[in-house]
Image (tube, rainbow, N blue to C red):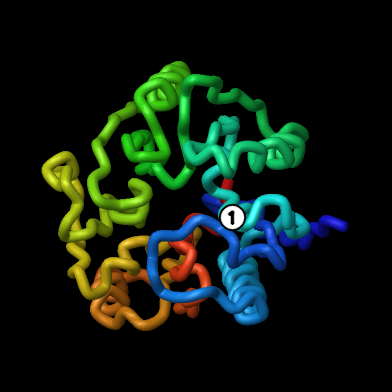
Amino acid sequence: MNSIIHLTNKSMFTKAIVRRPAHTYANGITTSNLGKPDINLALKQHDAYCEALIKCGLELIILDPDPNFPDSCFVEDTAVVTNDFGIITRPGDSRRLGEEVEIKKVLEPLLKLYSINAPGKLEGGDIMQADNNFYIGLSNRTNLSGSKQLADILTNHNYEVYSIPVCNLLHFKTGVNYLGDNNLLLHREFCSKDDFKSYNRTIIDNEEEYAANSLRVNDYVIVPKGFPKTKMSIEKLGYKIIELELSEYQKMDGGLSCLSLRF
């Protein structure tokens, strides 16, 4: 049975959708070569992630595990959401097609929805909002058709939209994440760094590249544990930090932003 944890916090984000990893989680898609994940440890780390989101003031909609889709705990890829509307995506790897169906059912009572249609491919991990700007990463999971469909929807809602090539990374937000206040985390090897000259850029070194996917949620920045340089750089910007162990998600090419849909 799906469950809802209620809070009354009035903030930039007020809700998040998460899905528990299934017993089939280790059968998901990965290129990390970090070994097979431990599902019991993954569940404990997911619990800690949910607790962190609650600490940040969010009401959680917790979805049951879906063993038919081993990657389905990475719910961010199935939709792009704002406070006013959402876009149901069309995952770029055929093995994930279908994950978006239940997410649509969950979001329909909450937001006005649009959809990305074939031949468009688009995953939420390639989409970053920075205030009134949206950046769409053109990766192996998001194509030009998907990018154009999303851009048309967003521009109709008065957002500025930019399409950016992604090289040698799974998703755009694997290497670039906006913290607010004009502050941006940027992977040193990201191939389109010049597109972000207007931001205060914190460059993440190669040895801490996983921490480029740190996540601002209201008054906190959630940072993966084990990356002290990145943690220190974010603290120097004035943010409060929550550190989380994510070893079992790193093994499956997943990060902090992937594990929730926040709006």
Camera-side residue: 132 or 256?
A: 256
Amino acid type of disc 1?
Asp
Q: Is residue 117 above or below residue 208?
A: above
Camera-side residue: 5 or 128?
A: 128
Query: What residue sits 52% from the left and 74% below the top?
Result: 36
Residue 55 appearing in the image: no
Query: What residue sits 43% from the left and 17% below the top?
Result: 152
Side of 77 where 10 appears, left or right: right
Furthest-right residue in view?
1
Residue 78 lies in quadrant = top right
Residue 202 lies in quadrant = bottom left
Q: Is residue 201 above or below residue 34?
A: above
Task: Assign a secondary structure to mark 1.
Answer: loop
Residue 69 drawn at (x, y percent): 66, 51
Q: Which residue is mark 1?
A: 71
Q: Is residue 33 above or below residue 127?
A: below
Mark 1 crowd level (few <14, some 14–19, many ≥20, 10 Å Cα) = many
Q: Is residue 249 above or below residue 169?
A: below
Side of 260 where 256 appears, left or right: left
Camera-side residue: 35 or 41?
A: 35
Residue 221 lies in quadrant = bottom left
Residue 189 drawn at (x, y percent): 16, 57
Residue 188 appearing in the image: yes
Side of 125 where 39 appears, left or right: right
Q: Quadrant of the N terminus?
A: bottom right
Query: What residue sits 58% from the left and 43% below the top?
Result: 96
Residue 136 drawn at (x, y percent): 35, 35
Residue 210 drawn at (x, y percent): 33, 67
Query: What residue sits 67% from the left and 63% below the top?
Result: 24
